[in-house]
Amino acid sequence: MATVLKANPREDLRGSATRKIRKQGLVPAILYGNKIDSQPVSVEGVEFLKTVRSVGKNGLFSLDVAGKKNHQVMIHDMQIDPLKNEYTHVDFFEVDMTSEIDASVPVRLEGEVPGEKEGGMVSHLMYEVTVRCLPSDIPEEITVDVSNLNIGDSIQVADIRSSVSVPITSADDETIVTVQVQAAEQEDGQAGDKEVSGTEEVEEKPAEE
């Protein structure tokens, strides 16, 4: 059964009205799409959270506006209050199931990194990859196997294209993850070089008479 989130139209768009519905546990939102006019709505905060957990950020679900019409939508943007950790506004985008769209898909690293056991530091640099496909084909996430990475190794977008079922539009040379030497080890090595260099200078200096 498809996930359904209920919404109600918002008539009063003044700031005072928006603050009031937030105090009631509702989240102000906007519904828009290529074939519909933008419509301010509100959704119940707890139910919206359940929907996000159920379908994910890129998942498709039905938005039932006042029990009159269901819109097949996905979440285009979410604003969160960092202090209260509450949703303050949501953008719902009505999708055309027959047209390809661009979507950002989360990247999850999978496996134990050999280079990390050798003292290397894993740097996850790219947390999302952009794909272009039909809405129904958008992956929930992309997993990247890091079990073969040693110190100095990295994985670029080009390396994962063949393992992803949909076209990736991110640039080939963008780095997803790399394993680097720990900063402390680099500093120790540089300090050691300086000490050796200083010793050589003392040894080469002629003795004073």
Image (cartoon, grey):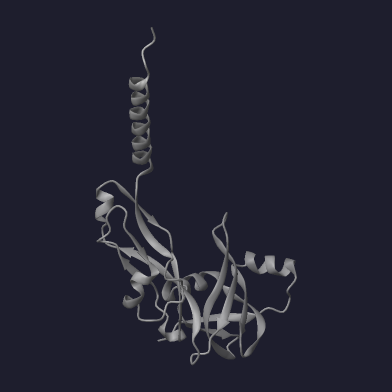
Residue at 72% x, 79% y is: 11
Quarter of the figure with the N terminus: bottom left
- Percent x, y of residue 49: 49, 70
Quarter of the figure with the C terminus: top left
Query: Image quarter for residue 69?
Result: bottom right
Q: Nearer the viewer, residue 203 or 206?
A: 206
Counting the numbered discs, the total is 0
Residue at 42% x, 74% y is: 54
Q: Is residue 135 above or below residue 187?
A: below
Horizontal side of residue 183 vs 102, given as left or right: left
- Percent x, y of residue 192: 33, 32
Q: Nearer the viewer, residue 182 or 100?
A: 182
Residue at 36% x, 41% y is: 186
Residue furthest out toward the bottom? 98
Q: Is residue 25 above or below residue 178?
A: below
- Percent x, y of residue 165: 35, 81
Horizontal side of residue 11 vs 194, given as left or right: right
- Percent x, y of residue 138: 42, 80
Q: Nearer the viewer, residue 187 or 27?
A: 187
Residue at 27% x, 52% y is: 115
Residue furthest out toward the top? 209
Horizontal side of residue 180 vs 7, given as left or right: left
